[in-house]
């Protein structure tokens, strides 16, 4: 497995522990906000032409608590992933292009958080 891309993003993930389906508008607004940030930071790119594996690390900020690991992928990360697709990182977020996503949490850099580290690996 080779590291192809590593990008730190100034994004605070939410875990949406109250459920995803309650407000379509909120999730849509998050997706557009994330996409605007990516475009502002000039993080638009050409998609990988082969399947990849992702490691997504939630870097905690001051006073943030670690979540259950199943919560990391179900919250606002989905809107971030959709924004990455919209900005050309991936052709699609389906299993043909993103084979696996691992979620991590880092509470050792609180002075730098909250942030998200996206690492893209070859499969």
Image (cartoon, grey):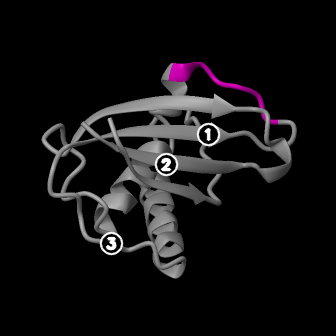
Percent across and percent down for residue 120 are 38, 47
The answer to whether residue 92 is above or below residue 17 is: below
Residue pictured at 35% horizontal, 42% vertical: 2
Magenta span contains residue 91: no
Residue at image mark 2: 118
Between 1 and 38, which is closer to the camera in this rendering?
Answer: 1
Percent across and percent down for residue 10 are 65, 60
Q: Decide if residue 113 is on the left or right side of residue 50.
A: right
Q: Secondary structure at mark 3?
A: loop
Marking on residue 58: 1
Marking on residue 45: 3
Task: Of the two numbered discs 1 and 2 on the same chain, state the one appearing first in sequence.
Answer: 1
Q: Which residues are magenta?
A: 64-69
Between 81 and 100, which is closer to the camera in this rendering?
Answer: 100
Quarter containing the C terminus: top left
Task: Of the two numbered discs 2 and 3 on the same chain, state the one appearing first in sequence.
Answer: 3
For the question of whether residue 21 can be seen, the reply is no
Contact check, label 2 and label 3, Cβ < 8 Å:
no
């Amino acid at each position: 497995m080779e590291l192809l891309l590593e990008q730190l993003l100034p994004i605070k993930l939410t875990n949406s522990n109250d459920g995803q389906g309650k407000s379509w508008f909120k999730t849509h607004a998050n997706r557009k906000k994330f996409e605007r940030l990516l475009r502002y930071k000039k993080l638009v790119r050409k998609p990988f032409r082969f399947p990849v594996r992702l490691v997504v690390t939630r870097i905690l900020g001051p006073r943030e608590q670690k979540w259950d690991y199943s919560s990391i992928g179900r919250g606002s990360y989905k809107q971030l992933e959709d924004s990455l697709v919209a900005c050309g990182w991936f052709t699609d977020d389906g299993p043909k292009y993103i084979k696996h996503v691992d979620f991590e949490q880092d509470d050792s850099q609180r002075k730098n958080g909250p942030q998200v580290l996206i690492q893209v690996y070859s499969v």
